[in-house]
Image (cartoon, helix red, strand yellow):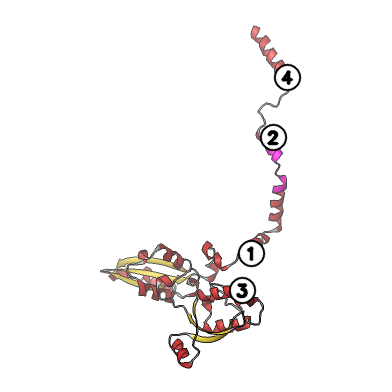
Amino acid sequence: MKRQGQAQSLKNLTKSNVWDIQENDVFRLWAQAERDSDLRDNERHYIDVIKSAFTIEEVKVDKPEVIKKYEERGCQVGQVRLDEGTTVKWALRKKPIQRITDLTWENIHHISAQKLIEVLERNFGGGWESLPQSVQDIILSGFDISTTTLPTARLKKPGGLYEKKVADGFEVLEISKGSWTEAIFAKEKPVTMVKPARLSSLEDSDDDNLLKDLDEEDDELPEEDKRQDDDDDEDFDDDKLTEESYRTTFDTNPEELEMQADEVGEDADY
């Protein structure tokens, strides 16, 4: 499973890396934040981030038999203190990724190719092209995908595409189509290739952080390039541009033009 950098505190927990932590990590991070005055101003934000990957239920009846039922459902029960000073118990459970509709831009980078194949196998039998385009886009943001459809008897021919893909580390899902079989090959993209450039994922970062990132990119320009950009701005002269744009072909004194016209008239008399 790919890791994007596990959060060390609630402050750097995002809707992406929240998928890397488990229920006990949520309670641990929250306990750390209880000692931080920042919790009071950002509690709602932290809860929204946690809810993107976990279901949170407040335990209204604090009895052993009730807590046991939560635990039987796969929840972990723990105590948290909210900003108004009240203490409550939460039943946390990581949201399962079982169907293609569970795949999101945030969690796709935190599952393995094997897990992806399991999700695809559980949900459809029409082949890759039968997936909604939105789901394809999400999957392609985190995985290299290729497909082939061949007569079943030829699919695993020695030296063929199937053998090469498996040797290269791809997981394979085979979908039977009568006497033919479609093979879907999936392999996790290297972490360095996974870029959170999708505009809709900007909700994980506030505008100030985005502007800061852009400023940092500008700061990374070589000093020579920066000086060149500055020089170009200084050399630009609106007045000069206007003058040159409207300059006529003849740059001659009007009196000289009149004299030349008279000479032409005299020559014409001959």
Give the SS element for disc 4.
Answer: helix
Q: Sequence-wise, which precedes: disc 1 or disc 4?
A: 1
Give the amino acid at mark 3: Asn
Mark 1 secondary-structure assignment: helix
> Which amino acid type corresponds to the residue marked 4 in the rendered image?
Glu
User: Is residue 7 covered in magenta?
Assistant: no
Measured in 3D between alpha carbons, the distance from the residue under mark 4 to the one under mark 2, in whole angstroms, is 23 Å
Viewer-side label of 3, 1? 3
Can you name the residue that lies furthest to the left here?
179
Residue that carries the numbered disc 2 in the rendered image: 243
Closer to the camera: disc 2 or disc 1?
A: 1
Q: Nearer the viewer, mark 3 or mark 2?
A: 3
Give the crowd class for mark 4: few <14, some 14-19, many >=20 residues within 10 Å: few
Amino acid type for the residue under numbered disc 2: Glu
Q: Nearer the viewer, residue 54 or 251?
A: 54
- Residue 54 x %, y %: 49, 78
Mark 3–mark 1 CB contact (< 8 Å): no
How crowded pointer 2 is (Cα within 10 Å; few <14, some 14-19, many 20+) is rated as: few
Please tell me which residue is depicted at 55% across the width and 76% down the height of the picture: 47
Q: Nearer the viewer, residue 132 or 114?
A: 132
Residue tagged 1: 208
The residue type indicated by label 1 comes to Asp
User: Element under label 3?
Assistant: helix
**Which residue is the site of mark 4?**
256
Asked which secondary structure carries label 2, the reply is helix
Q: CA distance from mark 3 to mark 4?
A: 80 Å
Please report whichever mark, 4 or 2, sits nearer to the chain's N-terminal start. Answer: 2
CB-based contact (under 8 Å), mark 3 and mark 4: no
Write down the region rendered in magenta. 232-243
